[in-house]
Amino acid sequence: MGMRRAGWEHMKTLIHLWKDRSGATAVEYGLLATLISIGMMVGLGAFSDSLLAVFQTITTAIIGARPV
C-alpha cells in the first residue's frame, strides 16, 4: 500500500509540473534575448565593415595630404 501511495504522489507532482506555466515567461524572455543578441551581432558585423572602410578612407586622405 505504501508503494502505491508513493507512486500516486510522484504522479501528482508530475501533473502539477506539467500544468505549471510560470516558467514559460522566463523561457520566452530568454528566447527573445537570444534573438536580439544574434541580430545585434549580425548588424554590428556589417556596421564594423563599413566603419573600417570609412577609417581607411580617412587614413588614406591624411597620408596623401602630408607634405613630403
Image: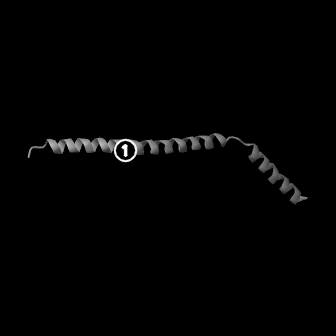
Toward the left, the furthest residue is 68
Toward the right, the furthest residue is 1
In the image, residue 53 lies at what x, y percent? 31, 43
Q: Secondary structure at mark 1?
A: helix
- Is 68 on the left or on the right of 35, as rendered? left
Residue at (80%, 54%) from the top-left corner? 10
Residue type at numbered disc 1: Ser
- Is 7 on the left or on the right of 65, as rendered? right
- Is 55 on the left or on the right of 67, as rendered? right
Q: Quadrant of residue 3?
A: bottom right
Residue at (76%, 43%) from the top-left corner? 19
Q: Residues within 10 Å of mark 1 (few under 14, many from 20)?
A: few
- Is 23 on the left or on the right of 17, as rendered? left
In the image, residue 66 lies at what x, y percent? 12, 43
Q: How many marks?
A: 1
Q: Quadrant of residue 64?
A: top left
Residue under pointer 1: 48
Residue at (14%, 41%) from the top-left corner? 65
In the image, residue 16 lies at what x, y percent? 77, 45
Residue at (54%, 45%) from the top-left corner? 34
Q: Quadrant of the N terminus?
A: bottom right
In the image, residue 47 lies at what x, y percent? 39, 41
When the figure is inspected, residue 36 is found, relative to residue 13, above or below; the finding is above
Q: How is the image coloured?
A: one colour
When the figure is inspected, residue 4 is found, relative to residue 37, above or below; the finding is below
